[in-house]
Amino acid sequence: MTETAHVMVVTPHPDDAEFGVAGTVAHWTSEGKDVIYVVCTNGDKGTNDPDMKPDELARIREREQLEAAKLLGVRDVIFLRHADQALEDTPEFRKELVRLIRTYKPEIMVTADPYRRYIWHRDHRITGRVTLDAIFPYARDFHSYPDLLEEGLQPHKVKEVLLWSAEQPNYRTNITDTFVTKMAALRCHRSQINDNPSTGWEEWLRERHTMLAQGEDYELAEAFYRIEIQW
Ligand SMILES: [Zn+2]
């Protein structure tokens, strides 16, 4: 079967993982940890340009995601290619994630916090929720998917989950040294960055990560809601 990976990042759209966790990913990969990305939707609605065709945009965004992942040292990128803004909490989607968890056997999983209140992208909410369900109980339990077992995909216990965009983070990582790499990875997403007429996003991002580091003895942080799973 496929090689295992230390970390699996499940991202709703191409570029969300870079905003959420790229600074931390750069640390992990520099320590020699294997990181893989799972990109749930094709991101084909992510434009304000009426002349941009969704098919073309999906292709562009895959290329951008691959470029960003390469820069961060991510080992593999798996594109599930669900339609943008159409992700649903279905048995099929859940099983796709369980299959990947059992294949790669990550210790750590990272995804969007599904429990942000009020205005929150539906694809982010669904991605986070289905990922958590896939981790427990479905990836863990022996009898959840007899057909996966028959394929040799044994149950797997993830040890730790990090959720980005959490309203009340309980865990921070120091990204002062990798912030430059995070910015470079974000710049790979040209279709998204150029889309935004306000050019102050780099300063905005620095301010955001400075704020997230408040109270720490370093300058820039990524912040998460962290769950350690006691199996
Ligand atoms: Zn997104």
Image (cartoon, rainbow, N blue to C red):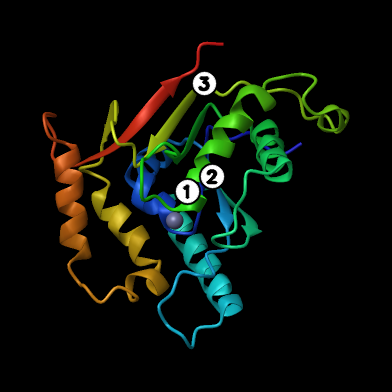
Quadrant showing the N terminus: top right
Under 8 Å from ligand 1: the CB of mark 2? no
- Residue 30 is situated, as x and y percent measured from the top left of the image, at 38, 41
- Residue 55 is situated, as x and y percent measured from the top left of the image, at 61, 76
Under 8 Å from ligand 1: the CB of mark 1? yes
- Residue at the location (35% across, 52% down)? 19
Quarter of the image where one finds residue 23: top left
Q: In what quadrant does ligand 1 lie?
A: bottom left
Q: Tag 1: Cα neighbours inside 10 Å, few (<14), some, or many (≥20)? A: many
Q: Amino acid at mark 2?
A: Thr
Residue carrying label 3:
159
Residue carrying label 2:
127
- Residue at the location (64% across, 58% down)? 82
- Residue 213 is situated, as x and y percent measured from the top left of the image, at 17, 36
Q: Tag 3: Cα neighbours inside 10 Å, few (<14), some, or many (≥20)? A: some
Residue 139 visible? The answer is no
Residue carrying label 1:
124
- Distance (Cα) linking label 3 and label 1: 22 Å
- Distance (Cα) linking label 3 and label 2: 19 Å
User: With respect to residue 84, does 130 lie above or below?
Assistant: above
- Residue at the location (63% across, 43% down)? 89
The residue most toward the front is 118
* For residue 58, side relative to residue 90 (left or right): left
Q: Amino acid at mark 3?
A: Lys
Number of residue marks: 3
- Residue at the location (42% across, 53% down)? 16
Q: Are marks 1 and 2 in contact (CB under 8 Å)?
A: yes
The secondary element bearing badge 1 is classed as helix
Near-viewer residue (46 or 115): 115
Q: Amino acid at mark 1?
A: His
